Amino acid sequence: MVSVTSPATSTTTETRPSTQESTARHFWLAIIALGIGGFAIGTTEFVTMGVLPQVADGIGVTIPEAGHVISAYALGVVVGAPVIAYFGAKLPRRALLVGLMITYAVFNALSALAPNYQTLMVARFLDGLPHGGYFGVASLVAASMVAPERRGRAIALVLMGLPIANVLGVPAATWLGQTLGWRASFWVVTALAALTVVMVLAFVPDCPGNPEATGRRELQALRMPQVWFAIVAGAVGFGGMFALFSYVAPMATRVGHLPDRAVPIFLLTLGLGMVFGNWVAGRLMDWSMKTSLLGAPVALAVALLASWLLVPHGYVALPALFLVTTVGSVLALGMMLRLIDAAQHAETLGAALSHGSLNIGNALGAWLGGVTIAAGLGYRSPLVIGAVLSLAGFAVLVLAFWADRSARSAAARSAAAHSAAVSS
């Protein structure tokens, strides 16, 4: 008996670590593949801010007018997110990711070739269309590969491509844009998007879509009040960070009186804050999403006001800028999880809408920042606008949690009354 069972037991014991190691290796390869796509998207989204003066000079417009190019991309994200969720919820998720990144590569190439302001505006809008869908689907793939209690960390790993882009991709692409011209930055991202297609095909598991999903069912999530609370809170609150991000180059050079070569250092600092914030955010959300969400916009407002005070002193402002993107990253991940939960069965739409919401904030922050600069209030005035937006986002979140608690209490009272009526 012993001689029969021992080999089986031994084989099971010996193969289990091998299976676990193989599973872990496949998980990390998939995360890296998805993260490269995030890296490409993060680089092209944020590098425009680093080379904004060069873009303005190259197409013959003012810096505030060039800032509308950032808003055009953000609006593309907002439009693309629900459209992709509507038509793509049933599709196999790997195939959908590949299609989105091919589209991204094509429109980045169009941005690099744009001969004038109008063409660049259209190209940036079109390039924004796949953004929300990619991150939404990639986040769902990552979450499906781990236990539910670790989904915050899994999604944070996928989103890590964005902050790493700000640490490595954006400063490098900004330097390249300042050296070889801003168009070179977009050609680099085109190549990164093509690499993502290859990596996703090679390493991401072929996850099925939701077979029960329909476009109509996905859009039913838009009838839920908590979905709209989350969209508005994310858009307004995150607009605070982008009021800074959109105009960081002229803040460094025209307010801080630093040379152009200081801009990549400022962008690197913002990127490091995003990396740290993303790492912290996953753990904070797994600990307490509500507490973390309420604290993030308040901390963001404080960091933006500190930046307003310190930017005239050049490099002294870097710690405050680091804090802005740290807490901004906590807010971003929190809003994604909040929207996924609020959307319930329409998880594809919820995940995609989170990026649409944040990019409304992108457009709002860039637009309001440009308005204040054009009004003659100076290049650091967007920081004050950003603080106001962050506090407005906090107010919306407070209202959302209050409404949610009231609805749950009313439902509980109704259920209790119904139970009592049945018992009698």
Image (cartoon, helix red, strand yellow):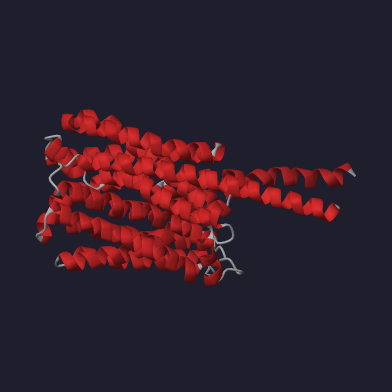
Task: State the residue in front, 390 or 311.
Answer: 390
Farthest-out residue, right: 1
Q: Residue at x 36, y 44 (%)?
A: 163
Residue 12: x, y in percent?
73, 46
Evaluate whether residue 147 shows in this view: no
Residue 138: x, y in percent?
47, 57
Evaluate whether residue 201 shows in this view: yes
Residue 174: x, y in percent?
21, 48
Q: Residue at x 52, y 56 (%)?
A: 225
Query: In the visual, does 275 lie left or right of 339?
Result: left
Query: In the visual, does 359 lie left or right of 143?
Result: left
Residue 360: x, y in percent?
35, 55
Quarter of the image that includes the N terminus: top right
Q: Residue at x 47, y 52 (%)?
A: 229
* Residue 302 against residue 12 in the figure, above or below: above
Q: Residue at x 37, y 43 (%)?
A: 392
Total of numbered circles in the picture? 0
* Residue 327 against residue 32 in the figure, above or below: above
